[in-house]
Amino acid sequence: MPRVADLAELVRAPAALSVPGDVVAGAAAAGALGPRTPALAAASVLLYWAGMAANDWADRELDAVERPERPIPSGRVSPGLAVGLATGLTVAGVGLAAAAGGRRATAVALPLAAAVWGTTWRPRTPPPAPP
């Protein structure tokens, strides 16, 4: 069972601190700040974390060569747990966006979730060793 610290490292938890500010700034610029803004910011954080976990899952073979200290190649987090966590965070992020913002937020969250997964879908393998 991984430690919470290992999962936090997998999703780059501290890096997500910038995400709510982006959501709030965008809502303010659009004149759309309101009671739903915090929940939509939280949904964005969940999707960000999903992307980080999915990325590490997709890059696990490359990371085994270039970043063996990362949670998956080091064995602290299994690949199955990482992809499961990424899936759960995606569902939670889209669900929270839908609950907080209705159809309009869902219309943004679904393509965003697809983009998160689309950028990590094809696992990358390490380059061949030099001759």
Image (cartoon, rainbow, N blue to C red):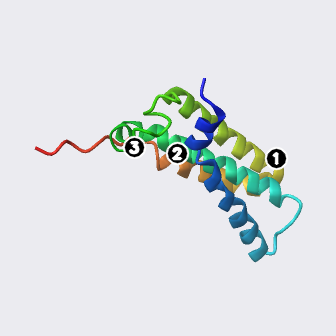
Residue 101 placement, left or right of 35: left
Q: Quadrant of residue 86?
A: top right
Quick one: label 2 or label 1, which is nearer the N terminus?
A: 1
* Residue shown at the point (68%, 52%) measured from the top left: 45
Q: Position of residue 75 (x, y in %)?
A: 47, 28
Residue ID for mark 3: 67
Q: Amino acid at mark 2?
A: Trp
Mark 2 vs mark 3, CA separation in Å: 21 Å
Quick one: label 3 or label 1, which is nearer the N terminus?
A: 3
Q: Position of residue 108 (x, y in %)?
A: 67, 56
Helix, strand or loop under label 2: helix
Residue ID for mark 1: 99
Q: Amino acid at mark 1?
A: Ala
Residue 59 placement, left or right of 84: left
Quick one: label 2 or label 3, which is nearer the N terminus?
A: 3
Helix, strand or loop under label 1: helix
Foreground: 66 or 109?
66
Is 101 located above or below residue 75 in the figure? below
Foreground: 117 or 7?
7
Q: Amino acid at mark 3?
A: Arg
Mark 3 vs mark 1, CA separation in Å: 38 Å
Which numbered mark, 2 or 3, is in the foreground of this view? 3
Q: Position of residue 11 (x, y in %)?
A: 59, 44
Residue ID for mark 2: 117
Could you classify mark 3 by the number of other residues whose Cα lies within 10 Å: few (under 14), some (14-19), or many (20 or more)? some
- Which of the image's four quarters has the C terminus? top left
Which numbered mark, 3 or 1, is in the foreground of this view? 3
